[in-house]
Image (spheres, grey):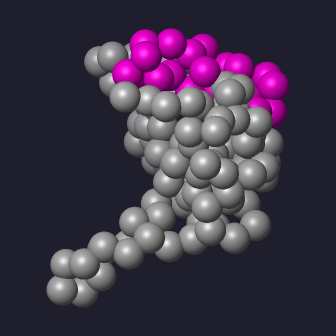
Amino acid sequence: MPFEVDSLKFNEQGLIPAIVQDHRTGTVLMLAYMNRLAVEKTLETGETWFWSRSRQKLWRKGETSGNNQKVVEVYFDCDRDTLLVRVEQRGAACHEGYFSCFHNLVEAGGGIRRVGERYFDPEEVYGKQG
């Protein structure tokens, strides 16, 4: 059965959430949004593409940092309104330099603890952001 991008349910902004997961460990790396073109480019190139809601532009993961994602599998959920993209992560997925964007652990009692190794210093890659 052939897959049709048009069969996906994009929201009113033309976006669909994409959960990105490391295919080896199962670690959830990030949540980002894709528009129709990002889905198409991801499927065509085998690398992840997303729509930046803050910058209002298409971007390829790793285009600035070099920490890109090779697509292993793409799933859609039963409602066709969410994607799960399983990838081979090369370097850090998080723009803060961590393997996963989910590196802030809320502990019992309300404390916060950073978990995971930091792969790079964002200021060295992206410059000072103010």
| Residue drawn at (61%, 48%) of the image | 121
Image position of 56 with respect to 73: above or below: above
**57 is within the stretch colored magenta:** yes
Report x, y in % for residue 15: 42, 24
Q: Answer with left or right where residue 79 lies relative to residue 35.
A: left
Residue placed at 29% from the left, 18% from the top?
Answer: 12
Q: Is residue 43 above or below residue 29?
A: above
| Label tally | 0
Task: Name the outermost residue toward the left.
Answer: 109
Question: Where's the N terminus, which quadrant?
Answer: top right
Can you give x and y, in whole percent of width and height, for residue 114 in the image?
44, 70
Q: Quadrant of the C terminus?
A: top left
In the picture, measured across the screen, residue 24 lies left or right of residue 81, that is right
Q: Residue at x 56, y 16 (%)?
A: 58
Q: Which residues are magenta?
A: 37-59
Is residue 27 a member of the stretch shown in magenta?
Answer: no
Report whether 65 appears left or right of 112: right
Quadrant for residue 122, please give it.
Answer: top right
Tell me residue 41's x, y (percent): 71, 20
27 vs 22, left or right, is left
| Residue plotted at (41% across, 42% down) | 79
Q: Is residue 44 visible?
A: yes
Front one among 22 and 63: 63
Q: Position of residue 51 (x, y in %)?
A: 50, 22
Q: Nearer the viewer, residue 99 or 3?
A: 99
Residue 83 in view of the camera = no
Q: Quadrant of residue 23?
A: bottom right
